Image: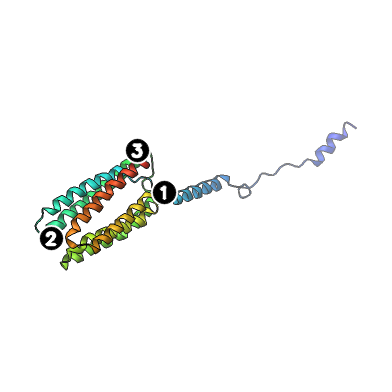
Amino acid sequence: MSETRPHRLRRFHRPLKPLSKDAVPDFGNDMADDLRFIRDTMERSASFTAVSGWGQVLVGGTALFAAWLATQQTSNFTWLRVWLAEGVVAVAIALLSCTWKANRRGLPLFSGPARKVALGLAPPLVAGAFLTFQLFRTGDTSALPATWLLLYGAGIMTGGAFSVSIVPVMGVCFLLLGGLAALGPAAWGNWFLAAGFGGLHVVFGFLIARRHGG
């Protein structure tokens, strides 16, 4: 009987067939796709936190100096030239300060929220550039302060919706100040600009720096 048992076992033994490549699930690709989906979802839902409060304070300081310098000008063209130069300086400071904060804290500078902030901010600024040319050409420079404040406030509100919560609040303040500039005396336009691009940037810059790490 001991001789027949191995024979009986060998009769039921079947060699295992190797699985084809199509039959083996590719867990590596599936896992990579899942991780990419999770990363993209988190990126879309995150906020842009690389806004530099100290950069905003510096922008406010240069705007206050520009407001004082603009009062020394004797023509609308030189007045406009001062504020346009301030706009270029402010953009450069904002970009450099955001880059500095992002590098210091290891934050993504060109993430999904950053692109959304840029897309929300850009259209009002582009519209402001064309309206500046149109209003200066028609000689209605007294409308420029209200136009700049209103459009900048609108851009900060739309773009700031993808940033920290205090940024849209700053946009609302710019809108309110722009409304006052539109309703107030034209002679106060330069001081409305000083209060907005100078004062509001300094105040909110300090708040951002204190609450959001610089």
Residue drawn at (48%, 51%), measured in percent from left and top? Answer: 41
Q: Amino acid at mark 3?
A: Arg
Q: Quadrant of residue 106?
A: top left
Q: Residue furthest front?
A: 184
Foreground pick, 154 / 95: 154
Disc 2 or disc 1, which is closer to the eye?
A: 2
Q: Which residue is mark 3?
A: 104
Tag 2: residue type?
Asn
Which residue is painted at 21% across and 52% down in the image?
194
Observer able to see residue 119:
no
Q: Residue furthest top?
A: 2
Q: Mark 2: which secondary structure?
A: helix
Residue located farthest toward the left when viewing the structure as drawn: 74
The front one of 144 and 111 is 144
Using the numbered discs, state the Cα–Cα distance from disc 1 to disc 3 in whole angstroms.
Answer: 17 Å
Q: Secondary structure at mark 1?
A: loop
Mark 1 belongs to which amino acid?
Ser
The residue carrying mark 2 is 76
Q: CA distance from mark 2 to mark 1?
A: 40 Å
- State the image coordinates of residue 105 (x, y, percent, origin top left): 37, 39
Quarter of the image with the C terminus in it: top left
At x 85% / y 38%, what residue is drawn?
8
Q: Secondary structure at mark 3?
A: helix
Q: Earlier in the sequence, mark 2 or mark 3?
A: 2
Q: Nearer the viewer, mark 2 or mark 3?
A: 2
| Residue 12 is at least partly visible in this image | yes
**Badge 3 density bin: few <14, some 14–19, many ≥20, Cα 10 Å:** few
Q: Position of residue 30 (x, y in %)?
A: 55, 48
Where 104 falls versus 42 (above or below)? above
CA–CA distance between discs 2 and 3?
Answer: 42 Å
